[in-house]
Structures are given as structure tokens and as C-alpha cells.
Amino acid sequence: MTNIPDTIAKEILNSEFQWISRENDVLIRAESREYGKFLVLNEVQIRYKADMPLRINAYTALAREKYKLPIYPVLINILPDGNINIPNRYESNFAGLQARQDYRVINFWEVDVNVAFQQEISSLLPFVPILKGGDDESTIREALRLLRADEQLNQLETVLAFFATFVLESELVQQIMRWDMAILRESPWYQEIEQRGKKAGLQEGLLSGIELALEIKFGSDGLELMPTISQISDLQKLQVVKQAIKSSNTIEELRAFLVV
């Protein structure tokens, strides 16, 4: 993340700052011979949001004030959202006073898939299908083999399968994973979704899951369907919609399904 070759990650710190809600960040204490002790502020977004420069500027300032250490901010975008020009700095100029905060941008779709294999960065394995050059069956099968062999990461094969559906047919993904519902229910990801559904109410939990799936797969265009979907009160129909999101290859397919 830093391009500083001798950097060593020491620990993950509590990155919750008062007054600011943060859901997708990781603050890592690191050291290098050249720069000494510093923090890596790692902000992960499914898709880039326009307010990220302002947010990273605020997070960086708060982390610097709290820990009294230099901060290396990194913005990681998992999925592309059109041809958006993603800036790598925050800048403002008010009444002759200037402020600027640089940060590094890592777009997964620009990262060569070989990095996950050759440099043994196993944490990238669940994202192989959406890395540059990772959208073929043999590469995904190899990522799955390595993921299942890693005791710390083998529970993330559901994440790999999810992103594989962006580049392969759902039936082929199921064949590659050799999935059945018993295996899926044992996944901590499935259990977490189930627990959230019980806590928030089954209907609210389903709508929340549908909204997240729409944003991940189709971006802002997908969220435009939520007003229509929110009118559905039948839980069985909502389950069908949730499955349709997974199987639809385009937003037009899903929109046609909802009309029917």
C-alpha cells in the first residue's frame, strides 16, 4: 500500500474518532528504517464516492492529532463506477488560505492479478476475479485452491465467489466452488447476514441486503430501483428479488424482471 519496501506492519489500531462515522477504514501502526514510526490510514470503498477527498483529509488530521505520528493515507476502490476521474488529493482555497492533503489511490481493477500470486499477498485472493487479468476460470480456480489452503482466509471463499459472478456465469461459479446450501450456511458471512436480519426484522434485513447488493453490482444505477423494491411486502418475493440480483448480468435484465 505504501511503496516503501522495508515497511513492517505492527498492529491495527482503534480508528474510531468522535463525531465522525467511519465504517470502512483500517488504521495500521507501521515502521520502516527510512521513515521510522508512522501510521497507514487505509480507507476501503466498494465504489468511489465524491466526498472521499474531504473525508480522508478529516480522518488524516484526526489520526495525526490523536497519535502524534506521520500519516500515510491510502484510498482503495474495489469496483469501478464508469469513467470517473478519481483524485489523489484534497485541496481547498478560501480567502487566500490554502489546504492540501495527498493520499495514494489503489484501484483494484488496475492491479495486476499476478501480484496476488507472485508476491504472495494472500489477502488479495478473494478479489482475484476483479483484478486486472483475473477474469478467467483457470485463474479463479487457482485463487480458490490457495484460499482454501490458507487457514486464516479460507472462510473468505464466499467473497471470491461473489466477485466471480461479475465475470463468469453464476452456474459456472457454483460448479467451481462446489457449493451447496449446507456449506453456505456454515460461512460466517452468511451467519452475520442472518443475525442482522433477525435483529432488524426479516423484511428490513432483506431490504438492507438487497440495497447493498444493488450498490455493489450496479452502482448508483442499481440504487434507483430501491423505491420500487421497497414497495414489496411479501418476504418470499423479496427473496426472489435478491436471487435475481445475483443472476442478472445487466441492470436492464433486473429492471425487466421487476416489471414482470
Image (tube, grey):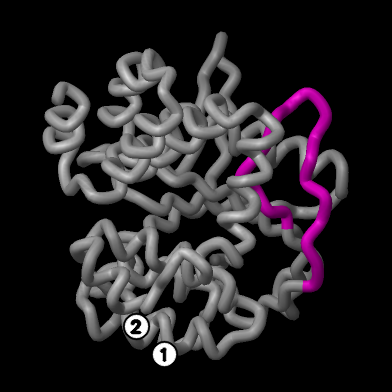
Q: Is residue 76 visible?
A: yes
Residue 151 pos. (x, y %): 64, 84
Distance between the alpha carbons at the discs numbered 2 and 1:
6 Å
Q: 50 left or right of 228?
A: right
Q: Secondary structure at mark 2?
A: helix
The label on residue 114 is 2
Q: Amino acid at mark 2?
A: Asn
Q: Residue at x 27, y 73 (%)?
A: 134
In the rendered picture of this protein, how many numbered marks are placed on residues?
Answer: 2
Q: Amino acid at mark 1?
A: Gln
The label on residue 118 is 1
- In magenta, the rendered stretch is 10-27
Q: Residue at x 37, y 78 (%)?
A: 178
- Is residue 188 on the magenta stretch? no
Q: Secondary structure at mark 1?
A: helix
Q: Which residue is farthest top?
A: 95
* Quadrant where the C terminus is found in the figure: top left
Quadrant in which residue 230 is drawn: top left
Front residue of this view, candidates 248 and 144: 248
Q: Residue at x 21, y 65 (%)?
A: 168
Quadrant in which residue 59 is drawn: top right
CB under 8 Å between discs 2 and 1:
yes
Residue 113 pos. (x, y %): 33, 76
Residue 102, compared with residue 22, is above or below; it is: below
Residue 193 pos. (x, y %): 59, 46
Q: Is residue 110 visible?
A: no
